[in-house]
Each structure stands twice: as structure tokens, then as C-alpha cells.
Image: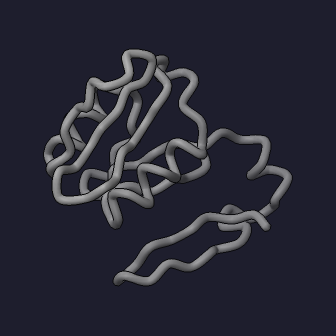
Amino acid sequence: MSGVWVFKNGVVRLVENPGGDSLQGSSRGKVLVHLPTNQVVTSYQALEQMLTSIGWERYYDDPSLLQFHKRSTIHLISLPKNFNKLKSMHMFDIVVKTRNVFEVRDS
């Protein structure tokens, strides 16, 4: 099963093959987009500013990871220290834990 999970009005649904040809979509990379600004996240510095603006805090428990925690939830976002190792699974984790703030798109 392939596609993009879309959260809208509190409902999640799978949009299969959102970009057209599945071969074309799978060969391209993914990008994380900050929906309020429609800006592609290009660095951890930018991501940290976006997350802190909605109440997330840096969590320094594991020095091998970049982590964020929101006090009002049990959620913890754990990312590789190197931004170049950020994978779509990390991006989707951010999307799920910050509903309606981020979206994963084909680059």
C-alpha cells in the first residue's frame, strides 16, 4: 500500500498515488512542508523554530539524537543528528504528532 496520509478536519485518510505515476513518485525524494508558511524544511534550525513556535521543546536525553517533546502530550519526536539522514519515516512521524502543521510531499 503506497500513498500519503492526509489529515483534514480531524480525519485521516490515505491518498494513493497523489502525484500521478507511481514509478515517478517512488524515484523522487520526499520533503517536509510547514503548512502555515508553505515552506519546505531545509534544516534542523528551521524545523526547531517551527516546532518551538507550536509548543515543542528540545529534549536532551539522548546525545545521539535530536529530540523534541511537547509537555501537554506523551509524544516524543526523535530524529537522526545529521539532517541529511532524515528519512520519510521521520517526516511522517512529525506529521502525525503535529496534526495539520506539516505535510510530506514529493520533491
Residue 81, percent from left and from top: 45, 19
Quadrant where the image shows the C terminus: top right
**Nearer to us in this view, 40 or 83:** 83
**Nearer to us in this view, 68 or 53:** 68
Residue 50, percent from left and from top: 23, 42
Residue shown at 79%/67% (left/top)?
A: 1
Image position of 15 (left or right of 76):
right
Residue shown at 55%/53% (left/top)?
A: 105
Residue 18, percent from left and from top: 66, 67
Image position of 71 (left or right of 60):
left
Total marks placed: 0
Q: Is residue 24 above or below residue 44?
A: below
Q: Quadrant of residue 84?
A: top right
Q: Is residue 56 above or below residue 86?
A: below
**Nearer to us in this view, 31 or 5:** 5
Residue 6, percent from left and from top: 51, 71
Residue shown at 71%/72% (left/top)?
A: 16
